[in-house]
Amino acid sequence: MKKYLILLIVVFLSLNSFAQKSLTTAQQEFADLRFGMFIHFNIPTFSTDDWPDPNTPASAFNPTKLDCNQWAEAAKSANMSYGCLTTKHHSGFCLWDTKSTDYNVMNSPVKRDVVREYVNAFRAKGLKVMLYYSILDTHHYLRPGHITQKHVELVKEQIRELFSNYGEITALFIDGWESPWARISYDEIPFEDIYLLIKSLQPNCLIMDLNASKYPSSALFYSDIKSYEQNAGEKMDKEGNQLASMSCLPVNKNWFWKKEFPTSPVKEAAYIVNDNIIPLNKAYCNFILNVAPNQFGLIDDNALKLLSDIGKLWKNNGPVASLAECETPIITSNIAKHKPADSSWSWDMQISDFGNDDDFHSHWESNKNIGKPWYTVDLGIERPFNMVTITEAMKGVQKYRIQYFAQQTWKTIVEGSNQHTVKIHRFDRVWGSKVRVLFDTFTANPTIAELGVYNERR
């Protein structure tokens, strides 16, 4: 009887650990982790470049003293709470035993599943496990001008493997997607499909697109967590931030190991603690420090000392301040993007085209002489949608209406007074060929950085 009781308890605990949490709970838990280790380790480790030749053979990957336990111990010495490993970087080499491609670690001299060893080592030390995955894949020609349906299936197959075979994954860091340098859109590799696939496999996994910084900082577009890469000049508003966030920085100048790393200066422990961990944590932001293993598969001594020094200066004192519940992330393609736009008289050069050009740094602005401004996007044909977003370039709108055109009639779906810069309105699905915003009261010229129209799955 005791054996059956123990078995039932084990099964219950196992099921409970994967019980679906609210997004706010998962975001809070992410912020509460406070500090973790980014591990850039892949085929670029064995090159002078972070973007090596896409045809670099798998045989180049040969860390002869690979020890993921050393990584985990180093993370614990700094009082980190988790790790995140680059399972596949931009050159397409997979660090796990994948069936999707021969370009993987099992065809290298190592012939060891590095992802498996990493997750086992970190969990053994009580550390949470996160993964990094690049959509851009130069080896498999998953890059602009070459993308086919086979590439979409490749991504899905690799995601299924990572989220089916390695236990609970706290978060996935996605890179090389919808950015000026990668130039792969959320339409070519459909973001909503990939997002929902991950959530179907592991509902509690947080999905963070490292390139979602092009979107406003006050709302979640294509990401469960806001991210800020300091090396790329991305800075978070530490005073005004209200969303669960992540900020990252490497110990050295580069993300992947370089031959000068063992003897070149690393960042100071006091700087990491006092200028990053402490102030960022106060703003709901988790800080992740990149520590790149060398060509032997080990962390260099100078980086190990830095981590130990950090651990002497700082420890995780528990949860950060409570996050407020936020709007569900926008994960669907914007069907208003680049569609013909029109408006009442505009101010100077800020004409209607700038209000739906997929650039939040440009905007349409109403002329100050117009008392009842309006802005319209023509979708071409009647089509379904159930969400509209208005992102102001400058606050000023107080009351507004959102209408859609169907069967030769304008119909009102929203009478809004949302004072946020990003106004998100979800509603029951309607069909229309045009969407119009009427500005009723405002304290400054109405502006639209982006008007979004979406047909999200529910």
Image: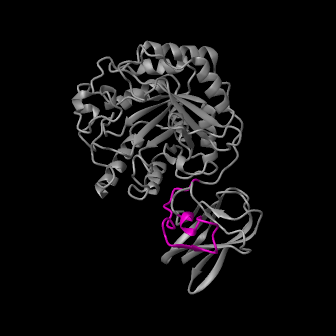
Read off the magenta span: 329-356
Residue 21: quadrant of the picture: top right
Magenta stretch, overall SS: loop
The reply, left or right, for residue 256 in relation to residue 344 is left
> What residue is drawn where x is 44% and y is 51%?
178
Q: Is residue 92 magenta?
A: no
Query: Residue at the location (56% across, 35% down)?
Result: 247
Q: Nearer the viewer, residue 4 or 142?
A: 142
Q: Quadrant of residue 343?
A: bottom right
Q: Residue furthest bottom?
A: 408
Residue 182 in view in this figure = yes
| Colour convention | one colour
Counting labels gives 0
Task: Say left or right for 156 vs 286.
Answer: left
Residue under the point 53% across and 67% down: 353
The quarter of the picture where the C terminus appears is bottom right
Q: Is residue 402 above or below residue 118?
A: below
Q: Is residue 261 left or right of residue 340?
A: left
Q: Nearer the viewer, residue 171 or 348?
A: 348
